[in-house]
Image (tube, coloured by chain):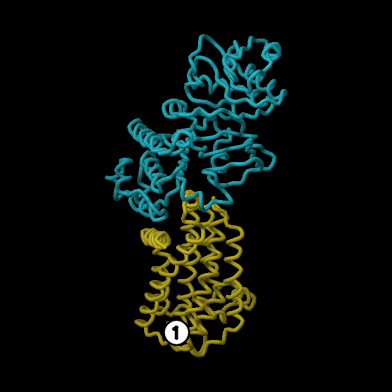
Amino acid sequence: MVSPESQPAIEVTDLTIRYGDRVAVDGLSFVAMPGQITALLGPNGAGKTSTVETLEGYRRPTAGSVRVLGFDPVAEHRQLVARIGVMLQSGGVATGMRPAEALHLFASYYDNPVDPDELLDLVGLADHRSSTWRSMSGGEQQRLSLALALVGRPDVAFLDEPTAGIDPAGRQLIRRVIADLRDRGVAVLLTTHDLEEAEKLADHVVIIDHGVVLADGTPTELMRASQGDDVRFGAPTGLDVSSLGARIGAVVTEVSPGEYVVASAATPTMVAAITAWLAEMDLPLADLRAGRQRLEDVFLRLTADASVPDAEPTTTRRRRSRR
Amino acid sequence: MKALVAQTRSELMLSLRNGEQLLVNIAIPLLLLVFFSAVKVLPIPTGVDKRVDFLAPGIIALAVMSNAMVALAIGTGFERHYKVLKRLGSTPLGRGRWVLAKIGMVKILLIVQIALIVIAAFLLGWNPGGNPWLAIPAVVLGAFAFGGIGLLMAGTLRGTVTLALANGLYLLLLLLGGMIIPFSEMPGFLGTIGKVLPSGALSQVLQSCLRSGAPVAGSAWIVLGVWAVLAPLAAVKFFRWE
């Protein structure tokens, strides 16, 4: 078991990734803790895949840094891969391979693998001994991919859209397996645009779009039922709330040290105004949470308006919600 | 070691499960050997007693090309297409052991293929001459040359393009490589081109090792050696894993 005081399993600091002129990830920072399911949420093209592939060592950051279990994923790839498990969104297995063969093969890569037959049982593929990958359904392929990600007893699991296109029973099964991983102290990084999934599973949600973090917190924090519409954010203590209030045209209160409430609906314009003010003051933003709503509302609101990412880049040095 | 053995076994199992690969690796070379030994349609160089004496070395060269270039390229190209290679990149297997497993697979398949060709050739009355032991390093050099070309295609092109190109190249290298049609029958410039191709170099070297009276293949050894070094180097340099 991992103690709650443990170090982050994943640290992303000011990560920037450019492909030629196109900026895929623009100064992204977040952490993921052991024993937590962290959901990286964002629309297509938000920079999720680029970020995760950098964490897995497939590409180098253009700027900034990433650490997984303290390792540089490219320079210390050999040490890293022994301790991570990866589930790609599709493919990854030779088309002529059978589930048990794939699991036994992957088990041979690791020093202390999980018993492949046990894993086949766990993901409900024990009776698919003779079907090859080519002849398996999408859901069966996803479940095998998940099992392959777990066979090496990873400390960090990267799961890309693990339940996309899967029937409800398969989805339940996969969610159970993921929750069980978390309970065993694994840091799970889930990439998804399925909000229900994030809401149900995640302990920690990072919403990104256009390569920047729009919101970061627990699902409850992000969806917090408040007295009415408001925006809550964490920042250094003793901010000049009247100056901020004047600037954004809403009342700002420091409800507890470093914890601020803005009496206004969490419109993209409002969020942008707050972050822009903080950026001007060169102040770090910890977390930012909108008022009573479903995660979906937060997500849609934050990602819908293109003006949000145009706000000054924010350094989101967030507090961790420790379990 | 455990991972390398398991990976090699898995590569072998997948290629044996794959009907097209068996066809191109085993059935086509054997068919060509038996057919053209029995049916007198193809010319043979002057001074050769039996057709099989000329065909057997060429068919061994063809087997090396089929296996190390065509089957390897197509298999690896589709593994890359289906993100198998990408997925392996995040396991502790590592590229070194992956390449060794591929080499091991090609080696084992080559031993089986060549054994079958040699048995068939003897049944057809083959009488090898020259210095047969030199055929072993020749086959190894040929496998590296063709394997390098195969992986270069698989690692740079789309899976379907690799499939098409590998098959096209197979036919071209077969026809121009002196494997079943002697260089002496080709117009001068085609023969010259053929002799600098890896297929031409390998078939000349194998003729000189396995047939008494075949010309000494000094320059062909050099051409083959150059291909065996340059093609794998190019593959290492340009191969993209996804």
Element carrying mark 1: helix
Closer to the camera in the image, A136 or A171: A171
Residue B30 makes an appearance in the image: no
Residue A166: percent from left, percent from top: 38, 34
Vertical arrangement, residue A322 with respect to residue B60, above or below: above
Vertical arrangement, residue B75 with respect to residue B58, above or below: above
Vertical arrangement, residue A117 with respect to residue A233, above or below: below
Residue B233: percent from left, percent from top: 60, 65
* Residue at the spot of label 1: B53
Q: Residue at left 56%, top 80%? A: B185
Write down the quadrant of residue A13 in the picture.
top right
Q: Residue at left 69%, top 25%? A: A279
Closer to the camera in the image, A87 or A61: A61
Number of marks drawn: 1
Q: Residue at left 41%, top 79%? A: B37
Quarter the N terminus of chain A occupies = top left
Which chain did the renderer colour cyan?
A: A
Residue B64: percent from left, percent from top: 47, 71
Query: Seen from this angle, which residue lies furthest right?
Result: A280
Q: Residue at left 47%, top 40%? A: A158
The amino acid on which the numbered mark 1 sits, given as a three-letter code, is Asp
Residue A139: percent from left, percent from top: 37, 38
Q: Is residue A191 left or right of residue A112?
A: right
Quarter the C terminus of chain A occupies = top left
Closer to the camera in the image, A61 or A102: A61
Residue B4 makes an appearance in the image: yes
Which chain did the renderer colour yellow?
A: B
Closer to the camera in the image, A184 or A201: A184
Q: In this view, does A121 lie to the left or right of B160?
A: left
Write down the quadrant of residue A167 in the picture.
top left
Q: How many residues crowd mark 1 within 10 Å: few (<14), some (14–19), many (20+)?
A: many
